[in-house]
Amino acid sequence: MARGRRHPVAILLTAAPHPTTIVRVLYINPWSQEISGPDESLRTLLAALIPMGVEAHVVIPELGPQVDRYQALGVRVHYAPIAVIKRRLGPWKTAHLPATFISGVRRIMDIAREVRADLIHSNMEVMFEGGVAARLMSLPHVMHYRGNTLDEPQWVFDALVRLWNVSADHIYCISRGTARVFERRHRAGKVEVMYNPVDLDRFRATPRSDEVRASLGAAPGQPLIGTVGRIHPRKDLDTFVRMAAAVAEKVPDARFAIVGTTKVKVEEDYLEHIQDLIRTLGLESRTTLPGARRDIASVMRALDLYVNASLHEGFGRVIAEAMAVGCPVVVGNSGAPPELVEAGRYGLLAGSGDPADFAAQALRILSSPSEAADYSARSLERSRLFDARDVAARVHQRYEALAAPARRG
C-alpha cells in the first residue's frame, strides 16, 4: 500500500490457521499493573494465539499482579529492566534512562537466545529495547502502537515516528485514529490497523446479576449508567459527573458508577477532585466508586448505559467490552471512539467536554426502551469486529510471514 495512504481495517478472517509449526514470540511489556488495558488486550490475544501454535514469552520489568494471569495461559514470564518513555520524566529517572536502556537490551537479547525466539513483539510504543535487540540479532520486530491520538509536541512525535519505523518490521495501530499519527508524517507503509481483541464468547455468556448491580449502587428497577477506566484527567470524569447531575434531575432513580483505580499522584489528586465534585453536586447517594474490578464482563452486563467521555482515546477497550454484552454506549466525538460507533450508527455521539450533550444522549436512551433495545442490538453487531479469534488469526499469519525468512536465513 502506498506510503501515507490511510489503511482500512483489514477483512476479518473466520478460520484459525492450523498450527503446523511453532512460532516462538518474545513479548516486551513495560509494566505489570493490576488494571492495564495493554495487558488485558495482550492476554486476550495470547489466549487465542497459543492454541494456534504460538509459544509465548512475556518480558516485564518486575513482579506484578499480571504474572499469575499470564502463567495461567501457559506463558513463560521473564524479567528485564525497561526504560519507559513518558511525556514527563523526573530528573532522577531521566539521568538513569540510558543505563536502564542498555541493561534492558542486553537482558532481552539473552532471553531471546535462551528461548530461541523467532521474533520480538513490543506490546507498546513507550520502549525501544525490543526493537534494538531485534535489530542487533537480525530478528523480525513487531510494534504495537497503543498510544492516544494526541501527537503533540509535533517535533517530538516527528522523531519518534521515524524511530518506530526504523526499529519495526510491522506496526499494529489500535485504531484509524492512532494510524493517522503515522499517516500525517507519510510513514504509514508498515502500519496495519487492528482493533484490540475481546473474548466475545465469555462476555456474551456472562449473565446479568442483581448482586453485581447492587455492588455498583443500583437496586432492581433503577437505571444504572457507568464508566470504566483509570481515574485520570484524560478520561474527563468531570464531564461524566456533570452529566450525571443533569440526568438525575430528570430521572431521580438513576444511579451512576465510576469503576477504576489510581496508580500515580496525578490520578490520586484527580480522584479527590472528582469526589469533591460529586459532593458539590449532591450526588453522593447516587454515585458509586467501587475501585478496580476484575469482573468487567459482569460490570458491563449490569449497566443499562455505558458512557465514555475520554479525550484523545486511542481505542477505548472498555467501549468494545460494553458493546460485547450489547450495552448501549454514548461516547465523545474525539479520538478513536467515534470510529468504533461509526459516527452514531452503533452508538450515540456527544460533544467532548459537553455535559449537557452527554446528558441529552443518555436521556434519549433512558426515555425510550425501544431505542435502547435497538442500540443494544447494534452494539452486539459491531462487537464482531473485536472477536479475539479473528484478530489472532490475522496476527498468526503475520508472524508466520515475518518468521519464515528469518528461519531460512
Image (cartoon, grey):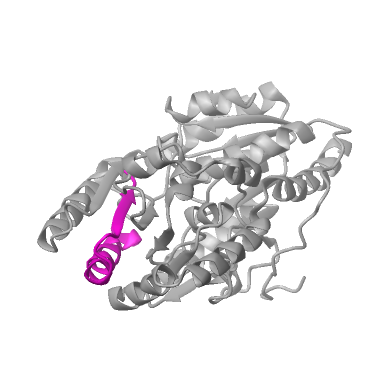
Tell me where residue 313 appears, x and y as whole percent: 45, 63
Residue at x 60%, y 66% (from the top left corner) = 378
Q: Nearer the viewer, residue 79 or 365?
A: 365
Q: Nearer the viewer, residue 6 or 374?
A: 374
Residue at x 65%, y 62% (from the top left corner) = 381
Tell me where residue 203 appears, x and y as whole percent: 58, 44
Residue 400, quarter of the rendered image = top right
Tell me where residue 23 appears, x and y as whole percent: 77, 34
- Considering only vertical position in the picture, is 308 above or below 65? below
Numbered circles on residues, count: 0
Residue at x 60%, y 47% (from the top left corner) = 198
- Considering only vertical position in the picture, is 268 above or below 340? above
- Considering only vertical position in the picture, is 203 above or below 33? below
Q: Is residue 266 magenta?
A: no
Residue 300 seen in the current view: yes
Residue 132 seen in the current view: no
Residue 330, quarter of the rendered image = bottom left
Residue 6, quarter of the rendered image = bottom right
- Is residue 388 rendered to the left or right of residue 264? right
Q: Is residue 243 magenta?
A: yes
- Looking at the figure, which quarter contains the C terminus? top right
Residue at x 42%, y 66% (from the top left corner) = 312
Tell me where residue 38 appears, x and y as whole percent: 51, 45
Q: Nearer the viewer, residue 22 or 114?
A: 22
- Considering only vertical position in the picture, is 248 above or below 99? below
- Looking at the figure, which quarter contains the N terminus? bottom right
Magenta highlight range: 233-262
